[in-house]
Amino acid sequence: MKFCSLCGEAAEQIIPEGDTRPRSVCTVCKTIHYVNPRVIAGTLPIWKDQVLLCKRAIEPRKGYWTLPAGFLENGETVEVGAARETLEEANARLENSQLYTIFSLPHISQVYMFFRADLADLEFSSGTESLEVALFSEADIPWDELAFPVINKTLEYYFTDRQNDTYPTHYEDILFRRRS
């Protein structure tokens, strides 16, 4: 950040008093501009023994399959944001939502939260961010065409948990390791 978004004056990277990390601080009004992780809210929509996936119409990973999810908006709860994203991407309505997976990805400053939920009905269709939406049984999941590791992991947890009919909340850190 080169300029303060409040007053337009120059900002500099310094460690503010009482802080431990460099932040963009306005040289005039002294506003500290924090940049914190983004929360992605989504769902694992279920119909009987199938899950609903969306083929992405946008980058990143256009043309790959994903669970409906997107950035949480200000003023939303995570559950409301997840349901909104499902409606926007798959025109699907949900019921019986329960927090299911949480992933922390510090290397890209993101936190993913997925809710396992039942589809209210079979009235779903592609939204503007989806090329296609479809129900998949476990044997038909396009594993090599999934958009993101958190999607693979959520589906793997689900199909394992379904064998025991027990669905605990899963938390996992996904750490990026640079090759040297």
Image (cartoon, rainbow, N blue to C red):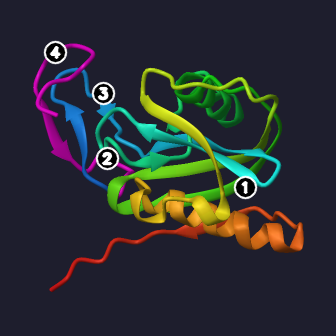
Say whether residue 90 is left or right of residue 19: right
Asked if residue 9 is among those painted magenta in the image, a careful observer would answer: yes
Q: Is residue 35 shown above or below 150?
A: above
**Mark with earlier residue (2, 3):** 3
- The residue mark sitting in front, 2 or 3, is 2
Q: Residue furthest front?
A: 140
Q: Mark 2 highlights which residue?
A: 61
Quarter of the image where the C terminus is located: bottom left
Q: Position of residue 95 (x, y in %)?
A: 83, 33
Within 10 Å of disc 3 (Cα), the crowding (few <14, some 14-19, many 20+) is some
**Mark with earlier residue (3, 1):** 3
Say whether residue 40 is left or right of residue 51: left
Q: Mark 1 highlights which residue?
A: 100
Q: Mark 4 highlights which residue?
A: 8
Name the residue type under label 4.
Answer: Gly
Q: Secondary structure at mark 2?
A: loop
**Mark with earlier residue (3, 4):** 4
